Image (spheres, grey):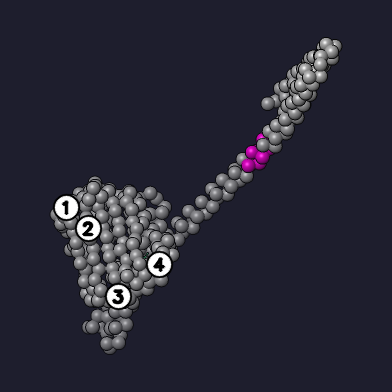
Amino acid sequence: MSKADRASRDQAVESLYAKETAALRLAEGALTRQQLSDVVYEPFRDVIKNYRRLLRQTMKVTAVSDATQLQLRRTSRELADALAKVETLNAELRALQEEKDELFAMAIHDLKSPLSGICGLAQLISDSALSESTEHREMGADIYHLGGDMLAMVADLVDLYRFESAPLTLASAEYSLAGFRDIISGTLGGIARRKRMALVFKIEPADATVVINEEAFVRIANNLVSNALKYAPQGSPVTVTLSVEDGEFRLSVADQGPGISPADQKKLFRKFARLSARPTGGESSSGLGLAIVKRLVDTMKGRVWCESELGLGTTFHVALPAG
Ligand code: ADP
Protein backbone atom coordinates (compact mmCIF):
# COMPACT_ATOMS: atom_id res chain seq x y z
CA MET A 1 0.00 0.00 0.00
CA SER A 2 1.43 3.42 -0.90
CA LYS A 3 2.00 6.20 1.64
CA ALA A 4 -0.90 8.22 0.13
CA ASP A 5 -3.24 5.19 0.27
CA ARG A 6 -2.31 4.58 3.89
CA ALA A 7 -2.93 8.25 4.84
CA SER A 8 -6.34 8.25 3.18
CA ARG A 9 -7.25 4.96 4.86
CA ASP A 10 -6.16 6.37 8.28
CA GLN A 11 -8.27 9.45 7.62
CA ALA A 12 -11.29 7.30 6.77
CA VAL A 13 -10.85 5.26 9.98
CA GLU A 14 -10.46 8.50 12.04
CA SER A 15 -13.62 10.03 10.55
CA LEU A 16 -15.53 6.77 11.07
CA TYR A 17 -14.31 6.76 14.68
CA ALA A 18 -15.43 10.38 15.13
CA LYS A 19 -18.84 9.68 13.58
CA GLU A 20 -19.39 6.59 15.66
CA THR A 21 -18.26 8.38 18.85
CA ALA A 22 -20.70 11.23 18.11
CA ALA A 23 -23.49 8.70 17.50
CA LEU A 24 -22.65 6.99 20.75
CA ARG A 25 -22.76 10.32 22.63
CA LEU A 26 -26.16 11.09 21.13
CA ALA A 27 -27.44 7.67 22.10
CA GLU A 28 -26.06 8.15 25.59
CA GLY A 29 -27.71 11.59 25.90
CA ALA A 30 -31.01 10.25 24.61
CA LEU A 31 -30.91 7.44 27.08
CA THR A 32 -30.20 9.83 29.97
CA ARG A 33 -32.97 12.22 28.83
CA GLN A 34 -35.44 9.38 28.71
CA GLN A 35 -34.86 8.85 32.46
CA LEU A 36 -34.86 5.14 31.89
CA SER A 37 -34.61 2.90 34.83
CA ASP A 38 -31.15 1.66 35.82
CA VAL A 39 -32.24 -1.81 34.83
CA VAL A 40 -32.55 -0.76 31.18
CA TYR A 41 -29.90 1.99 31.14
CA GLU A 42 -26.98 0.04 32.66
CA PRO A 43 -26.73 -2.65 29.97
CA PHE A 44 -26.90 0.04 27.26
CA ARG A 45 -24.10 2.00 28.91
CA ASP A 46 -21.97 -1.16 28.99
CA VAL A 47 -22.70 -1.77 25.32
CA ILE A 48 -21.62 1.79 24.49
CA LYS A 49 -18.49 1.46 26.64
CA ASN A 50 -17.54 -1.83 24.98
CA TYR A 51 -18.21 -0.49 21.53
CA ARG A 52 -15.91 2.47 22.20
CA ARG A 53 -13.18 0.16 23.47
CA LEU A 54 -13.61 -1.97 20.37
CA LEU A 55 -13.22 1.07 18.14
CA ARG A 56 -10.05 2.15 19.95
CA GLN A 57 -8.60 -1.36 19.66
CA THR A 58 -9.44 -1.52 15.96
CA MET A 59 -7.44 1.66 15.43
CA LYS A 60 -4.50 0.28 17.43
CA VAL A 61 -4.57 -3.03 15.54
CA THR A 62 -4.54 -1.16 12.23
CA ALA A 63 -1.45 0.76 13.33
CA VAL A 64 0.30 -2.41 14.59
CA SER A 65 -0.44 -4.31 11.39
CA ASP A 66 1.06 -1.42 9.38
CA ALA A 67 4.28 -1.62 11.42
CA THR A 68 4.37 -5.42 11.06
CA GLN A 69 3.87 -5.19 7.32
CA LEU A 70 6.70 -2.67 7.08
CA GLN A 71 8.98 -4.97 9.11
CA LEU A 72 7.98 -7.99 6.98
CA ARG A 73 8.75 -6.09 3.79
CA ARG A 74 12.15 -5.07 5.16
CA THR A 75 12.94 -8.66 6.28
CA SER A 76 11.94 -10.21 2.96
CA ARG A 77 14.08 -7.63 1.10
CA GLU A 78 17.05 -8.59 3.32
CA LEU A 79 16.35 -12.31 2.72
CA ALA A 80 16.20 -11.80 -1.05
CA ASP A 81 19.57 -9.96 -0.92
CA ALA A 82 21.12 -12.78 1.15
CA LEU A 83 19.71 -15.42 -1.23
CA ALA A 84 21.15 -13.62 -4.25
CA LYS A 85 24.57 -13.55 -2.52
CA VAL A 86 24.36 -17.29 -1.71
CA GLU A 87 23.41 -18.06 -5.33
CA THR A 88 26.39 -16.07 -6.64
CA LEU A 89 28.72 -17.86 -4.21
CA ASN A 90 27.25 -21.24 -5.24
CA ALA A 91 27.80 -20.52 -8.91
CA GLU A 92 31.43 -19.53 -8.18
CA LEU A 93 31.93 -22.71 -6.14
CA ARG A 94 30.43 -24.85 -8.91
CA ALA A 95 32.76 -23.32 -11.47
CA LEU A 96 35.78 -23.93 -9.21
CA GLN A 97 34.66 -27.51 -8.53
CA GLU A 98 34.27 -28.19 -12.28
CA GLU A 99 37.72 -26.76 -12.97
CA LYS A 100 39.24 -28.91 -10.20
CA ASP A 101 37.43 -32.04 -11.47
CA GLU A 102 38.64 -31.40 -15.00
CA LEU A 103 42.27 -31.00 -13.86
CA PHE A 104 41.98 -34.08 -11.66
CA ALA A 105 40.44 -36.17 -14.47
CA MET A 106 43.21 -35.07 -16.86
CA ALA A 107 45.93 -35.92 -14.32
CA ILE A 108 44.42 -39.36 -13.67
CA HIS A 109 44.03 -39.99 -17.37
CA ASP A 110 47.66 -39.08 -17.99
CA LEU A 111 48.73 -41.74 -15.45
CA LYS A 112 47.41 -44.47 -17.76
CA SER A 113 50.21 -44.43 -20.35
CA PRO A 114 53.23 -44.50 -17.98
CA LEU A 115 51.50 -47.17 -15.89
CA SER A 116 50.87 -49.32 -18.95
CA GLY A 117 54.56 -48.87 -19.83
CA ILE A 118 55.65 -49.99 -16.33
CA CYS A 119 53.38 -53.05 -16.61
CA GLY A 120 54.81 -53.95 -20.01
CA LEU A 121 58.40 -53.68 -18.75
CA ALA A 122 57.58 -55.65 -15.60
CA GLN A 123 56.14 -58.41 -17.78
CA LEU A 124 59.41 -58.47 -19.76
CA ILE A 125 61.43 -58.73 -16.54
CA SER A 126 59.23 -61.57 -15.29
CA ASP A 127 59.77 -63.36 -18.61
CA SER A 128 62.09 -66.29 -17.80
CA ALA A 129 64.17 -65.95 -20.98
CA LEU A 130 65.33 -62.42 -20.11
CA SER A 131 65.79 -62.54 -16.33
CA GLU A 132 68.85 -63.96 -14.68
CA SER A 133 67.36 -65.05 -11.35
CA THR A 134 64.09 -66.45 -10.05
CA GLU A 135 64.00 -63.59 -7.58
CA HIS A 136 64.08 -61.03 -10.40
CA ARG A 137 61.34 -62.88 -12.24
CA GLU A 138 59.16 -62.92 -9.11
CA MET A 139 59.78 -59.22 -8.52
CA GLY A 140 58.87 -58.50 -12.14
CA ALA A 141 55.62 -60.46 -11.72
CA ASP A 142 54.79 -58.54 -8.51
CA ILE A 143 55.38 -55.18 -10.21
CA TYR A 144 53.21 -56.35 -13.11
CA HIS A 145 50.31 -57.29 -10.78
CA LEU A 146 50.58 -54.12 -8.66
CA GLY A 147 50.70 -52.05 -11.84
CA GLY A 148 47.59 -53.87 -13.04
CA ASP A 149 45.76 -52.99 -9.80
CA MET A 150 46.78 -49.36 -10.22
CA LEU A 151 45.62 -49.34 -13.84
CA ALA A 152 42.24 -50.75 -12.76
CA MET A 153 41.97 -48.05 -10.08
CA VAL A 154 42.89 -45.34 -12.59
CA ALA A 155 40.26 -46.68 -15.00
CA ASP A 156 37.62 -46.59 -12.21
CA LEU A 157 38.58 -43.02 -11.29
CA VAL A 158 38.46 -41.87 -14.91
CA ASP A 159 35.00 -43.46 -15.27
CA LEU A 160 33.64 -41.98 -12.04
CA TYR A 161 34.71 -38.47 -13.02
CA ARG A 162 33.34 -39.01 -16.51
CA PHE A 163 29.97 -40.18 -15.07
CA GLU A 164 29.85 -37.14 -12.82
CA SER A 165 30.76 -34.53 -15.39
CA ALA A 166 28.12 -35.48 -17.98
CA PRO A 167 24.79 -37.32 -17.82
CA LEU A 168 25.27 -40.98 -18.72
CA THR A 169 23.37 -42.43 -21.64
CA LEU A 170 23.06 -46.21 -21.60
CA ALA A 171 21.35 -47.63 -24.65
CA SER A 172 19.39 -50.85 -24.03
CA ALA A 173 19.20 -53.91 -26.26
CA GLU A 174 18.03 -57.54 -25.99
CA TYR A 175 20.32 -59.51 -23.70
CA SER A 176 20.21 -63.27 -23.30
CA LEU A 177 21.01 -64.56 -19.80
CA ALA A 178 22.38 -67.77 -21.34
CA GLY A 179 25.85 -66.24 -21.87
CA PHE A 180 26.14 -64.66 -18.41
CA ARG A 181 27.82 -67.56 -16.63
CA ASP A 182 30.67 -67.78 -19.18
CA ILE A 183 31.29 -64.04 -19.12
CA ILE A 184 31.66 -63.87 -15.32
CA SER A 185 33.63 -67.15 -15.14
CA GLY A 186 35.90 -65.80 -17.88
CA THR A 187 36.83 -62.67 -15.94
CA LEU A 188 36.68 -63.91 -12.35
CA GLY A 189 37.06 -67.72 -12.60
CA GLY A 190 40.85 -67.46 -12.23
CA ILE A 191 40.59 -65.45 -8.99
CA ALA A 192 37.95 -67.88 -7.65
CA ARG A 193 40.21 -70.87 -8.42
CA ARG A 194 43.24 -69.17 -6.82
CA LYS A 195 41.21 -68.65 -3.62
CA ARG A 196 39.55 -72.11 -3.89
CA MET A 197 36.11 -70.47 -3.95
CA ALA A 198 33.25 -72.08 -5.89
CA LEU A 199 31.19 -69.76 -8.10
CA VAL A 200 27.65 -71.15 -8.01
CA PHE A 201 25.26 -69.81 -10.68
CA LYS A 202 21.45 -69.97 -10.45
CA ILE A 203 19.85 -68.51 -13.57
CA GLU A 204 16.04 -68.66 -13.61
CA PRO A 205 14.80 -69.07 -16.31
CA ALA A 206 18.12 -69.99 -17.93
CA ASP A 207 17.07 -68.97 -21.45
CA ALA A 208 15.35 -65.67 -20.54
CA THR A 209 16.10 -62.43 -22.36
CA VAL A 210 15.87 -58.93 -20.95
CA VAL A 211 16.30 -55.46 -22.46
CA ILE A 212 19.19 -53.72 -20.75
CA ASN A 213 22.58 -52.17 -21.41
CA GLU A 214 24.80 -55.28 -21.43
CA GLU A 215 28.10 -53.50 -20.82
CA ALA A 216 26.79 -51.68 -17.75
CA PHE A 217 25.07 -54.80 -16.38
CA VAL A 218 28.19 -56.98 -16.78
CA ARG A 219 30.25 -54.30 -15.10
CA ILE A 220 27.82 -54.18 -12.14
CA ALA A 221 27.89 -57.98 -11.84
CA ASN A 222 31.70 -58.13 -12.13
CA ASN A 223 32.05 -55.56 -9.35
CA LEU A 224 29.70 -57.37 -6.97
CA VAL A 225 31.08 -60.87 -7.66
CA SER A 226 34.68 -59.68 -7.38
CA ASN A 227 33.84 -58.04 -4.03
CA ALA A 228 32.31 -61.30 -2.77
CA LEU A 229 35.47 -63.17 -3.85
CA LYS A 230 37.65 -60.44 -2.33
CA TYR A 231 36.09 -60.16 1.13
CA ALA A 232 34.78 -63.70 1.86
CA PRO A 233 37.15 -66.29 3.33
CA GLN A 234 39.19 -68.45 0.97
CA GLY A 235 37.44 -71.77 0.29
CA SER A 236 33.89 -70.41 0.79
CA PRO A 237 31.28 -70.41 -2.01
CA VAL A 238 29.77 -67.39 -3.76
CA THR A 239 26.26 -67.74 -5.18
CA VAL A 240 25.17 -65.61 -8.13
CA THR A 241 21.44 -65.60 -8.92
CA LEU A 242 19.65 -64.06 -11.91
CA SER A 243 15.86 -63.99 -12.04
CA VAL A 244 13.14 -62.28 -14.02
CA GLU A 245 9.85 -61.67 -12.26
CA ASP A 246 6.99 -59.17 -12.64
CA GLY A 247 8.89 -57.10 -15.20
CA GLU A 248 11.91 -56.86 -12.93
CA PHE A 249 15.33 -58.33 -13.65
CA ARG A 250 17.21 -59.18 -10.48
CA LEU A 251 20.84 -60.02 -9.76
CA SER A 252 21.83 -61.27 -6.30
CA VAL A 253 25.36 -62.07 -5.15
CA ALA A 254 25.60 -63.92 -1.83
CA ASP A 255 28.80 -64.62 0.09
CA GLN A 256 29.78 -66.13 3.42
CA GLY A 257 32.12 -63.28 4.33
CA PRO A 258 32.42 -61.13 7.45
CA GLY A 259 29.18 -59.22 6.81
CA ILE A 260 28.73 -55.44 6.83
CA SER A 261 27.67 -53.57 9.98
CA PRO A 262 24.61 -51.25 9.79
CA ALA A 263 26.97 -48.24 10.22
CA ASP A 264 29.16 -49.41 7.30
CA GLN A 265 26.08 -50.14 5.16
CA LYS A 266 25.22 -46.42 5.25
CA LYS A 267 28.62 -45.54 3.70
CA LEU A 268 28.84 -48.42 1.18
CA PHE A 269 28.08 -46.50 -2.02
CA ARG A 270 30.18 -43.42 -1.30
CA LYS A 271 33.39 -42.74 -3.23
CA PHE A 272 36.56 -44.03 -1.51
CA ALA A 273 34.52 -46.00 1.07
CA ARG A 274 37.03 -48.51 2.37
CA LEU A 275 35.21 -50.05 5.30
CA SER A 276 35.80 -52.64 8.02
CA ALA A 277 36.03 -55.73 5.76
CA ARG A 278 39.52 -56.21 4.32
CA PRO A 279 40.51 -58.37 1.32
CA THR A 280 41.24 -62.00 2.23
CA GLY A 281 43.76 -62.73 -0.54
CA GLY A 282 46.00 -59.64 -0.69
CA GLU A 283 43.82 -57.91 -3.32
CA SER A 284 43.81 -54.13 -3.63
CA SER A 285 40.90 -51.99 -2.47
CA SER A 286 40.09 -48.47 -3.62
CA GLY A 287 36.54 -47.95 -2.37
CA LEU A 288 35.35 -47.00 -5.87
CA GLY A 289 33.62 -50.17 -7.14
CA LEU A 290 30.30 -49.75 -5.33
CA ALA A 291 30.18 -46.01 -6.13
CA ILE A 292 30.37 -46.98 -9.81
CA VAL A 293 27.73 -49.72 -9.32
CA LYS A 294 25.33 -47.22 -7.72
CA ARG A 295 25.85 -44.65 -10.49
CA LEU A 296 25.18 -47.27 -13.20
CA VAL A 297 22.13 -48.73 -11.42
CA ASP A 298 20.65 -45.25 -10.89
CA THR A 299 21.14 -44.43 -14.56
CA MET A 300 19.35 -47.68 -15.47
CA LYS A 301 16.46 -46.63 -13.15
CA GLY A 302 17.06 -49.58 -10.87
CA ARG A 303 17.80 -50.20 -7.20
CA VAL A 304 20.80 -51.65 -5.40
CA TRP A 305 20.90 -52.66 -1.74
CA CYS A 306 22.45 -55.22 0.55
CA GLU A 307 21.28 -57.60 3.25
CA SER A 308 23.93 -58.50 5.75
CA GLU A 309 24.54 -59.72 9.23
CA LEU A 310 27.94 -59.52 10.90
CA GLY A 311 29.68 -62.89 10.81
CA LEU A 312 27.04 -64.45 8.55
CA GLY A 313 27.81 -63.02 5.12
CA THR A 314 26.35 -60.50 2.72
CA THR A 315 23.93 -60.57 -0.21
CA PHE A 316 23.93 -57.67 -2.66
CA HIS A 317 20.76 -57.26 -4.73
CA VAL A 318 20.28 -55.27 -7.92
CA ALA A 319 16.79 -54.84 -9.42
CA LEU A 320 16.47 -53.38 -12.92
CA PRO A 321 13.49 -52.84 -15.20
CA ALA A 322 13.52 -55.94 -17.46
CA GLY A 323 12.53 -54.13 -20.66
P1 ADP B 1 36.79 -51.73 -2.86
O1 ADP B 1 36.34 -53.15 -2.86
O2 ADP B 1 37.73 -51.42 -3.98
O3 ADP B 1 37.34 -51.28 -1.53
P2 ADP B 1 34.00 -51.07 -3.06
O4 ADP B 1 33.36 -49.73 -3.29
O5 ADP B 1 33.63 -52.15 -3.97
O6 ADP B 1 35.55 -50.78 -3.11
O7 ADP B 1 33.66 -51.51 -1.58
C1 ADP B 1 33.72 -50.57 -0.52
C2 ADP B 1 33.92 -51.27 0.81
O8 ADP B 1 32.74 -52.03 1.13
C3 ADP B 1 35.05 -52.30 0.80
O9 ADP B 1 36.28 -51.68 1.11
C4 ADP B 1 34.60 -53.30 1.88
O10 ADP B 1 35.04 -52.92 3.16
C5 ADP B 1 33.08 -53.24 1.82
N1 ADP B 1 32.48 -54.38 1.06
C6 ADP B 1 32.14 -54.40 -0.24
N2 ADP B 1 31.62 -55.60 -0.58
C7 ADP B 1 31.65 -56.36 0.53
C8 ADP B 1 31.25 -57.71 0.84
N3 ADP B 1 30.72 -58.52 -0.08
N4 ADP B 1 31.44 -58.15 2.12
C9 ADP B 1 31.96 -57.33 3.05
N5 ADP B 1 32.35 -56.06 2.83
C10 ADP B 1 32.20 -55.57 1.59
Q: Secondary structure at mark 4?
A: loop
Name which quarter of the figure residue 5 lies in. Answer: top right
Q: Is residue 139 above or below residue 288?
A: below
Residue wearing tag 1? 208
Instruction: Give the prevailing secondary structure in the magenta stretch.
Output: helix
Q: Pointer 2 and pointer 3: residues touching (CB < 8 Å)?
A: no
Query: What label does residue 260 carry, if any?
Result: none
Relative to 87, is 14 on the left or the right?
right
User: Ligand 1 shows up in which quadrant of the image?
Assistant: bottom left
How would you rate the neighbour count of disc 2 (Cα within 10 Å): few for under 14, some for 14-19, many for 20 or more?
Answer: many
How would you rate the neighbour count of disc 1 (Cα within 10 Å): few for under 14, some for 14-19, many for 20 or more?
Answer: some
Q: Is residue 2 above or below residue 163?
A: above
Task: For marks 3 and 4, give the CA distance.
Answer: 17 Å
Q: Start and end of the magenta stretch?
A: 73-79
Residue 50 is situated, as x and y percent measured from the top left of the image, at 76, 25
How would you rate the neighbour count of disc 3 (Cα within 10 Å): few for under 14, some for 14-19, many for 20 or more?
Answer: some
Q: Is mark 4 within 8 Å of ligand 1?
A: no
Residue 289 is situated, as x and y percent measured from the top left of the image, at 35, 63
Q: Pick whichever of labels 2 and 1 is earlier in the sequence.
A: 1
Name which quarter of the figure residue 284 lies in. Answer: bottom left
Query: What label does residue 242 carry, if any?
Result: 2
Task: For marks 1 and 3, give the CA distance.
Answer: 32 Å
Residue wearing tag 4? 261
Q: Pick whichever of labels 3 and 4 is earlier in the sequence.
A: 3
Q: Residue at x 70, y 31 (%)?
A: 65
Looking at numbered disc 1 in the image, what kind of residue is underneath it?
A: Ala
Task: For marks 4 and 1, give the CA distance.
Answer: 35 Å
Q: Secondary structure at mark 3?
A: loop
